[in-house]
Amino acid sequence: MTREEFEYHVPSAVMPDDTLFERIAAHLADGEASVQSLLGRGLYDQRSQDLTLLNLCNRVVCLEAYNNAIPHLDLVLTENGFGVVSNQNVAPASSERVNRLREQVKQSLDDAIDDLLDYLRGNPLWVSTDTATAVFRSLVWNGRQQLVYFAVLNGHRSTLDELRPKIAAAEERIKHCISHEFFNELCDALRLRTATTEQNTAIHKILMTIGADVTEDKAMAHFHVKKLVEWLDGNIRTFPTYANSTAYAANTFEPYKNEKDDPCFFFG
């Protein structure tokens, strides 16, 4: 990784000399390790064959390194941005400004990881990895989904992680209504990038339900799950996994009604 490549991905680190880059370079290995863990060794070794993938990986590496390095740097605010304090005559930047920088870098890193995950969807060298399966065990996999479904105006992966327990609980309730098998099928469709128009519509309706549940709007959650099930039942031929599930059987079960000509009469 050259200084020019690093500064391309992290404009706030642009300085007239090598001082800042040299201090951060020691953390690049940590960024590389994170990307390798995300991609898996096979795809990581071949990333240079796909320039878009390589660029996304390099961006994550640079931001990860910068994010990890900031707490160990004596930063000073200059006309061109942040630099490293190199003598006793320059006052370090205020903790407030440094914390604001760290937050900005962390959010940029979160978004870069989201972009990389989105690009990896459907890649045959990635979709069967443990990381891919873990990421797409949930329909809520991207920090930006929070704006649409959870009314979080500046949501990123970090805030998504904070909501994960509530999201997991909401998804368990959804699975009870549509079956674990059908829910997992939709997760697989996202991971494999094979989702049909109908599956994407189902995913959207599920996310609307999850969003209402996570934000504790129980009335709206009940409304959305009712509409979800009605829509699935109305398009049942499109969703054979759901059609063959015990959830569908329970959703469409009608109690026995006695008729006057029945040979037996059931009390209840």
Image: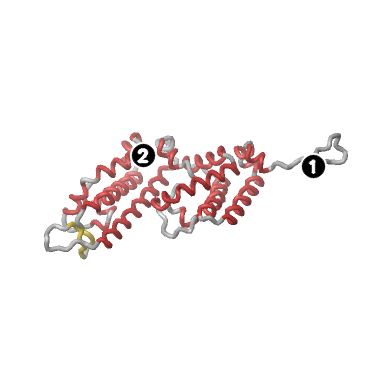
From this view, report whether residue 228 is shown above or below residue 152.
above
Residue type at the position of mark 1 = Lys
Corner quadrant of residue 246: top right
Tell which of 93 and 105 is nearer to you.
Answer: 93
Is residue 242 shown above or below 70? above
Rounded to the nearest angstrom, the CA distance separating label 1 from label 2 is: 57 Å
Residue 53, position as x, y percentages in the image: 35, 44
- Specify the quadrant that holds the C terminus: top right
The location of residue 167, given as percent across then percent down, is 49, 48
Q: Is residue 202 left or right of residue 190?
A: right
Q: Residue furthest right?
A: 261
Tell which of 58 and 132 is nearer to you: 132
| Residue at the spot of label 2 | 39
Q: Which mark is residue 257?
A: 1
Q: Pick out the residue farthest to the left.
A: 88
Say what secondary structure mark 2 lies in: helix
Tell us which disc is closer to us: 1 or 2: 1
Q: Residue at x 64, y 39 (%)?
A: 243
Secondary structure beneath label 1: loop
Cβ–Cβ under 8 Å for marks 1 and 2: no
